Image (cartoon, grey):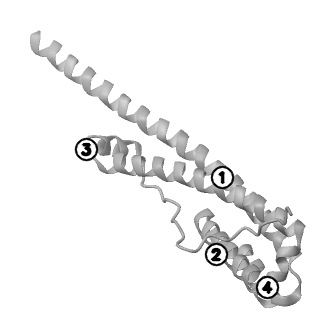
Amino acid sequence: MIYFIAIVVIIAILLIIFISIDNHFKTLLIKINAAFLNCTNSLSRKKDLVLKIIEQLDNKEKEKVLNIKSSLEKYEDLFDFYSKLEKSSFDINNILESHPSYNENHKLNDLLIDLSDIQDELDADNNYYNDNVIIYNNLVKSFPSNIVSLIKKYKNKCIFEKIKMEKYKILKEDNQ
């Protein structure tokens, strides 16, 4: 009888541990999915803004502008889209730096300020997403939570890679 009670207690403890770890996974998945949705929305807004900025550019750099537009049309997944959008922002910055005459375009300056704000939101969303994915991936790999991840078939998730490009410069409005 004592052995039976001991076995039931051990099984109950193991079940409680299993449920606790599974709940931790579920909480992280909720955070990850919410952050991913925020990243998706921010990327969509950033793409719209990049396209509006491209419309403001005249034909001085037509070939570069067409390359930027075409790169934003073809992507495999959100992570690929993110890297292409970051590269397009970098390319736009290079175009703007090579033609100082754009400094006088107030609408373009306003769009660049909006782009900077969206970029800050996107960076925050990406950091939140990446932080939670790192915790999640560590849980998937480490004992004893890896047992739960095998049973529940939780897989490693990808993170947003930080792109090592010079952050695009905001053109300052002439307030004088």
Q: Nearer the viewer, residue 56 or 133?
A: 56
Query: Which mark is in front, 3 or 4?
Result: 4
- State the residue position of label 2: 87
Q: Is the residue 105 above or below the residue 62 in the image?
A: above
At horizontal 85% and vertical 61% (from top left) the residue drawn is 175
| Mark 1 or mark 2: whose residue is earlier in sequence | 2
| Mark 3 or mark 4: whose residue is earlier in sequence | 4
Q: Is the residue 117 above or below the residue 53 in the image?
A: above
- Secondary structure category for the residue under label 2: helix
How far is disc 3 from disc 4 in space, using C-alphas? 57 Å
- State the residue position of label 4: 99
| Mark 3 or mark 2: whose residue is earlier in sequence | 2
Crowd class of label 1 (few under 14; some 14 to 19; many from 20; radius 10 Å): some
Q: Is residue 92 visible?
A: yes
| Residue 143 - label | 3
Q: Nearer the viewer, residue 143 or 121?
A: 121
Quadrant for the C terminus in the image = bottom right
Residue 154, how many percent across, how many down?
Answer: 42, 48
Residue 123, how many percent across, how many down?
Answer: 59, 56
For residue 9, side relative to residue 63 (left or right): left
How far is disc 1 from disc 4 in space, using C-alphas? 28 Å
- Secondary structure category for the residue under label 1: helix
Crowd class of label 2 (few under 14; some 14 to 19; many from 20; radius 10 Å): some
Residue type (three-letter) at the residue carrying disc 2: Lys
How far is disc 1 from disc 2 in space, using C-alphas? 17 Å
Q: Nearer the viewer, residue 44 or 153?
A: 44
- Secondary structure category for the residue under label 4: loop
Crowd class of label 3 (few under 14; some 14 to 19; many from 20; radius 10 Å): few
